[in-house]
Image: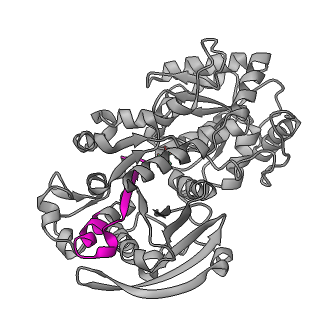
Amino acid sequence: MNILFAASEAAPFCKTGGLADVAGSLPVALAEGGDNVAVILPLYAQVDGAWREKMTYRFYTYVDLAWRHEYCGVFSLEHRGVTWYFVDNERYFRRAKLYGEFDDGERFAFFSRAVAELLPRLDHMPDVVHCNDWQTALVPVYLKDFAVRREEYKRVRTVYTVHNIEYQGWLGEETVTDLLGLDRGWWNTGMLQMDGAVNLMKAGLMTADAVTTVSPTYARELRYPAFAHGLESVISAVSHKLTGVLNGIDMVSFDPAADAALPANYSASNLRGKTTCKAALRRELGLSAEKGTPILAIVSRLVGHKGTDLICQVFDQMMEKGVQLVVLGMGAPGYEDFFRRAQERYPGRVASCITYSDALARRIYAGADLYLMPSRSEPCGLSQMIAMRYGTVPIVRQTGGLNDSVRSCQTGQSDGTGFVFANYNAWDMLHVIGEAVSLYGSEGFRTVRRRCMEEDMSWGHSARIYRDIYGKLLG
Ligand code: GLC
């Protein structure tokens, strides 16, 4: 099977969030299973020189977006069994950041149309094109549009994955003809239209042959307004083709036994290196060396839906439970200030790193004992899985992928891998942090930690589910 993955970011080339981890590792897993897999990405300024040196220039063409006639260069490289294509247009992709530009709609309409136009010119004509989030939601629309007139497009099938329904991509009605270059029929039939505007995510959901989201629990939650951000009616209209598939993590990149970013390596059977990592983390971040005190870590965007408000609400009571706290992340200025202040108020006990660094994140996953993720909603969440892989026991709220990846150990279940609370309530969270802290240091805690490290979070199982979905579409 020839599979093309279309995404707006993929590790290790360009990354702002979890989508990059998925687009960087699921294709590799599919290729390991024997499929012919390629990924197509924008060639952002942020893709660094070392990768650019490995690229081969392939060809250029022009892509028309309504009245625009835009240059489109194509580069490629081979990496981990996958062909990675890069779409070059410096006007659109040589920017200070990946997203958040005034013309994001135009930039990703260009990218999506380019992907669709390029299919027959790639090394292998894809059987399945797998698109992700609002940035590539127009790809299935264009493919369906082209298939009406162009024979080579008739066999192509599409999968659309929702990584986070909160970010939908809204454009004005006039863009249908003036930017997207589509017939008004796409608007009149309701494929693009949502509340009087163009909604790209709706377009992807409506037009793709199959729809997936990144955990089974999130797939169920999306039926409810509290989770669907206005798209609940669309979700119910597409429920016959919707599947929740839990993400995996890249077990090679995230491996405490081999991770070069750590001061010492370790594994489930020999945890001495983890003790070294904890001591080194305390020195690096100015935390005091308190024997028997667990380090509780948070690596997260500091925004509301990650549950940051719960943490602020009971912060002092949480510190009274006897933890040291490490926070890494950026986000809403109010939360950033809160954590900076917290470090001043708790010298030697709280370390707030208001930045983002992949290497520091790894040292934190390795050096901490507990990992807090109280999200209000979490489509999948990858950091709880990375924390587990590094032997750091998660404390999570029972939602989305957190519910599907962490099993509660509180009620004496013999296979628990973490601490779970159900209600979005700061005091419930606090209670569970208390349970985790009291188990810390015991044989029971060591057992839970070992189970976390031995958990299979690889892509193997989920890659098989995706392959089944592709296979069914191809008949
Ligand atoms: C988004 C979601 C996150 C998920 C990731 C990868 O970032 O918010 O929960 O893990 O996509 O699918």
Which quadrant would residue 216 be assigned to in this image? top left
Left or right: 148 with respect to 405?
left
Q: Could you tell me which residue is drawn at 19 percent across and 69 percent down? A: 176
Image point 81% across, 45% down: which residue?
A: 257
Residue 83, percent across and down? Answer: 58, 70
Classify 259 as above or below 400. below
Residue 77 point in image, percent of width and height? 61, 75
Q: Is residue 299 visible?
A: no
Which region shows up in magenta?
Answer: 141-165
The residue lying at 43 percent from left, 53 percent from top is: 470
What residue is shown at x 56% (from left), y 17% (from top)? Answer: 431
Which x, y percent locates residue 116?
A: 36, 72
* Residue 394 visible, this angle: yes
User: Whole-percent x and y of residue 56?
Assistant: 60, 83
Magenta stretch holds residue 158: yes
Q: Is residue 406 magenta?
A: no
Residue nearest the observer in this picture, 179 or 304: 179
How is this picture coloured?
one colour
Classify residue 424 by image quadrant.
Answer: top left
